[in-house]
Amino acid sequence: MTDKSLAELAVEVLTTADGRDKTAISRRNAALWFDSRKAGTPLPIGQATPPDRPARPAQPELLDPRDVPRRRPGSPQGRIAMLHAVAHIELNAVDLHWDIVARFKDTEMPLGFYDDWVKSADEESRHFNMICDSLKAKDSFYGALPAHAGMWRAAEDTANDLMGRLAVVPMVLEARGLDVTPGMIKVFENAKDTQTIEALNVIYAEEVGHVAYGSKWFNFLCGRHALDPKAEFHALVRRYFHGPLKPPFNEEKRADAGLPPDFYWPLSDETPPAYAR
Ligand SMILES: [Fe+2]
Ligand SMILES: [Fe+2]
């Protein structure tokens, strides 16, 4: 049990720097929330101010994406670099999901909204831990290589706009994960790396849910404000996301997650197929 509010539990995660500590607190706090829900006595959502930027470990060094060295994906070093980048994305995702829980307290949302993002944060925490285990099996660790700075940019840009946050984070960035994960799984299948293949398959399956939560609550808010979801999505992505979306798109998994082709295709730099205009 805890006498803390959900917002306070979220800020506790966001202000923890070490990756393994952050994910351990994230998983514990998610369990506290769901225990309270099962008991029929949900913790109050409460008020707590999330930091502008979440606490992060001293390593990895954060570099401009152009300065992060590229390695050949077919080599062992290339696979470590790929996993390192995934770990960085997962840790960022832990913070993103707790941030959405604590930041938009002026917008009243059903408890199901909090359930979805706390569950997502719990899953991202497992993803980070699994990828770190896989790095460890290769005598590496999260922090051994530099990582992209600017991953928090989407959060900062949408810090005052819940619909913008939903459009850009789950419906653009996490949907992108659905596009690229099958190719990564192939890389590790070629290397016969069972541990990593299993981890990536869990990630691939669970990320569909995160994108689906994004579209669910985006549509919910469009309904509340009598907005056309497609037009609103296009407007918000153009306002907050810098650059075009990159095909090829995983149309099947995006459909599973409630993202129709005419949402994302018109935001790409290629001519949409006739069915997606
Ligand atoms: Fe994830
Ligand atoms: Fe995710």
Image (cartoon, rainbow, N blue to C red):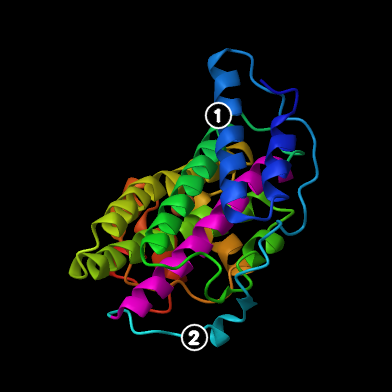
Quadrant in which the C terminus appears: bottom left
Query: Which region is colored magenta?
Result: 75-104
Residue 181 % position (x, y)? 33, 62
Identity of the residue drawn at 69% across and 63% down? 157
Q: What kind of element bears circle 1?
A: helix
Local packing at callout 2 (Cα closer than 10 Å; few below 14, some 14-19, many 20+) is: few
Residue 59 % position (x, y)? 63, 69
Lower sequence index among marks 1 and 2: 1
What residue is pinned by disc 1?
31
Asked if residue 194 can be seen in this view, the reply is: yes
Q: What kind of element bears circle 2?
A: loop
Identity of the residue drawn at 58% across and 34% down? 28
Give above or below for 220 relative to 240. Answer: above
Residue 60 % position (x, y)? 60, 70
Q: Residue 34 magenta-drawn?
A: no
- Hey, which quadrant is residue 146 in on the image? bottom right
Q: Amino acid at mark 1?
A: Ala
Local packing at callout 1 (Cα closer than 10 Å; few below 14, some 14-19, many 20+) is: some
Identity of the residue drawn at 49% across and 75% down? 244
Q: Is residue 162 left or right of residue 256?
A: right
Asked if residue 258 can be seen in this view, the reply is: no
Please tell me whether the stretch drawn in magenta is mainly helix, strand or loop: helix
Q: Amino acid at mark 2?
A: Pro
Give above or below for 266 relative to 41. Answer: below
Q: CA distance from mark 1 to mark 2?
A: 38 Å
What residue is pinned by disc 2?
69
Q: Is residue 233 left or right of residue 43?
A: left
Q: Is residue 2 left or right of residue 95?
A: right
Q: Residue 88 magenta-drawn?
A: yes
